Amino acid sequence: MIGIILFGHGKMGREITGIIETSTKMEIAEEGKNYEKMVVIDFSHPIRHDEAVSFAEKSGLPLICGTTGLSGEQFERMRELAKQVPLLYSSNFSYGISVIKKLLRESAELLKGWDTEMVETHHNQKKDMPSGTAKTLTKVLEDVQGAGAVNVHSLRGGTVAGVHQVQFFGADEIIEIKHTAISRRIFAEGACMTVEKIIKFEPGFYSFDEIVTESKDIVN
Amino acid sequence: MIGIILFGHGKMGREITGIIETSTKMEIAEEGKNYEKMVVIDFSHPIRHDEAVSFAEKSGLPLICGTTGLSGEQFERMRELAKQVPLLYSSNFSYGISVIKKLLRESAELLKGWDTEMVETHHNQKKDMPSGTAKTLTKVLEDVQGAGAVNVHSLRGGTVAGVHQVQFFGADEIIEIKHTAISRRIFAEGACMTVEKIIKFEPGFYSFDEIVTESKDIVN
Amino acid sequence: MIGIILFGHGKMGREITGIIETSTKMEIAEEGKNYEKMVVIDFSHPIRHDEAVSFAEKSGLPLICGTTGLSGEQFERMRELAKQVPLLYSSNFSYGISVIKKLLRESAELLKGWDTEMVETHHNQKKDMPSGTAKTLTKVLEDVQGAGAVNVHSLRGGTVAGVHQVQFFGADEIIEIKHTAISRRIFAEGACMTVEKIIKFEPGFYSFDEIVTESKDIVN
Amino acid sequence: MIGIILFGHGKMGREITGIIETSTKMEIAEEGKNYEKMVVIDFSHPIRHDEAVSFAEKSGLPLICGTTGLSGEQFERMRELAKQVPLLYSSNFSYGISVIKKLLRESAELLKGWDTEMVETHHNQKKDMPSGTAKTLTKVLEDVQGAGAVNVHSLRGGTVAGVHQVQFFGADEIIEIKHTAISRRIFAEGACMTVEKIIKFEPGFYSFDEIVTESKDIVN
């Protein structure tokens, strides 16, 4: 059983708590109880973030951090901490999107010269267009196929949590890669998934993608 | 067996000939042979079109015409002819698109207040954007939901013959209606399909939609 | 403001309460307060159902009932009640599925002779296969196209709330009609949507489909 | 300009001829003309196949062979020939399917524990079910995820050339990988694509997948 010290009780904090409560491998750490392994998770605010970092510093425990809006100074302090403990920072904890990135990088290599189009769909309250994830995926594709290789089309409707679809068009054939997020819960799932991985890592500053989809290369 | 007098031997004319050759219900009319029923089909050029009209006039046979680029005068002459024979004119003989129009009209009525998005995909050589069909479908939707109700996204890639997809987004549910044209052959199929219908019609000027999807209402 | 008397506080009851709380047109009826219009909603159990019916009987208020597992006797009593008040009974309150039924009925008529395939996708805990909705939609299609006209394919995976997709295949063209339920909330939305409609109805026993998608025909 | 000696003038042979005729890099070899590079392509019948092999033997030219129904003896003879010339044999020359195989292998690794479902769609005249490609893709997935990990659903309708769609279902997210063949022309395209590659290869017996999607690993 892995003991979790959780900072942050907002939307994401509550989702993470919910997942931990039904897990057979981890629990919210109880005071006074001994755990073989412990991990600090921080999904709080820039203001409370320093407290989480201090806790990881003193205890020497791994830190998983998804707090956004941090200052340059705060990132510097995390990089310093990463010399002593394994530290994972990411602004996107969706495992599926991480997989999609890998698949798109590979597809873009194999499908050079094919026409590429992206369609992303989100609820009608979303303000940014295209979505942050669409921008990231476009960058992945254009790093291989060159700037301007991808057109992004943004659909806004209803309560859609997030759909990203890339189509590659060749002569008389089409390859499509699509990710559908049914709810925001996947980001909490993604964070919890890294707990079991990070406890096996050497100190260092890791991204979510490195840990979940390319861990083999890193560990060796 | 229905005898067909075909004007036009271009791309569409050849497709129509191909379909008729494998049909058990119609054949290209042979000279001297007697047919119970005959139909004139004109998929030619504005220059040859008058010849087809004259033929229908003299013979009193039904005329199916898909020639584009006709003058106002030529349309007038067809309207005159339509007082004597059943005459079908259309610039789009796709049966599926005709069905889609009906479904969209109905959906737009039933799904007022839902967000509506259209995605149309065509080969990368297509110059107009959005496609003519996308414009027609948008008109169908906006006649019900109001101007500006639909966003159209145009994807261009590979050799795609034509895909039109409409999504209606409600609270936690999505309804999608999609038409895929695999080849241009469907337009020739659509024209041939009207042959058996038009021979039962009273003289008049008909549209493709009227004949194939709403014929009941018209005949009664 | 319409006052709602709600019987049932299970999963559906709570969803309905949630929707009413954010509505500007209805509220859970407060004792002693006067409402111009009131409606009884029953999403309870067969045991508590009789209480809801009695309440509607005495008060003469319209009744919307989605309680399942009722006995033949209980249905008889509702039919009796429907002579005095407008009464809506349904085991499926999804508006989108109701629309899909109409679209499929029409498509099946227009696409006779096309090959028809249905794919339904639900979460991996769902036990029945195909889904109840898939069976209903199959019936709609086969009523028009004949028994055995539709193959149903059941996909089970993850946490999918419910996807029903029907494809009609013609010569070189495909028409697809698809419904995606993102969450179970749509059933509660559907129930609340009928409130404003039922208060305008004459006494009678109505189905959800009649009220939401074909109300015009009924009222006239 | 690469000179092509083509054996086989059936459906595939004609498609290949059509592609070569519009190519700027290769042409059907004219007698007496000198070419820097030449390649033998064999899409014929088991009876004529030996002639193609003899030609490659005598001339020392690379051989691309897609003839099916060969005997064990004929394969042995090709393996012998591959010691002297680069020889490519495959029963499936679709580049897109080759890419899909790579993407599925990688996805299956990254998405262990997710539910996997495959849907394949082909025209209503296709007799085998599931398709040969669906079987190959299932093998790719089950090599990683274990026997029985994938359910295959076969849809048959209209004139569809071939669609293969794999969905991976996780907790609240879905990843989909899909290949659409618009026509059989892609197989001829795939064969022609290998021409420019095989002329740079060392003698050896190669598969289509090796040459088109993993050539780097092989050449180095």
Image (cartoon, coloured by chain):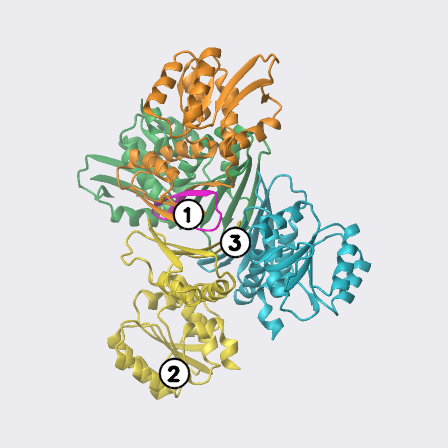
Chain colours: A cyan, B green, C orange, D yellow
How far is disc 3 from disc 1 in space, using C-alphas? 22 Å
Region rendered in magenta: C156-176
Disc 2 marks a residue whose amino acid type is: Gly
Q: Is A198 on the left or on the right of B72, as rendered?
A: right
Q: Quadrant of residue B7?
A: top left
Q: Which secondary structure is most common in the magenta stretch?
A: strand
Disc 3 marks a residue whose amino acid type is: Lys
Q: Position of residue A50 (x, y in %)?
A: 79, 56
* Residue that badge 2 annotates: D32
Q: Position of residue C132 (x, y in %)?
A: 37, 38
Residue at image x 51%, y 22%? C195
How far is disc 1 from disc 2 in space, using C-alphas? 46 Å
Mark 3, other Cα within 10 Å: few <14 / some 14–19 / many ≥20: many
Q: Are marks 2 and 3 in contact (CB under 8 Å)?
A: no
Mark 1, other Cα within 10 Å: few <14 / some 14–19 / many ≥20: many
The mark found on residue B138 in the picture is none
Q: Quadrant of residue C141?
A: top left
The mark found on residue B181 in the picture is 1
Q: Position of residue D59 (x, y in %)?
A: 37, 87
**Residue C198 in view of the camera:** yes
Same chain under badges 2 and 3? The reply is no
Q: Is C66 on the left or on the right of A157, as rendered?
A: left
Residue at image x 36%, y 22%? C74
* Residue that badge 3 annotates: A178
Disc 1 marks a residue whose amino acid type is: Ala
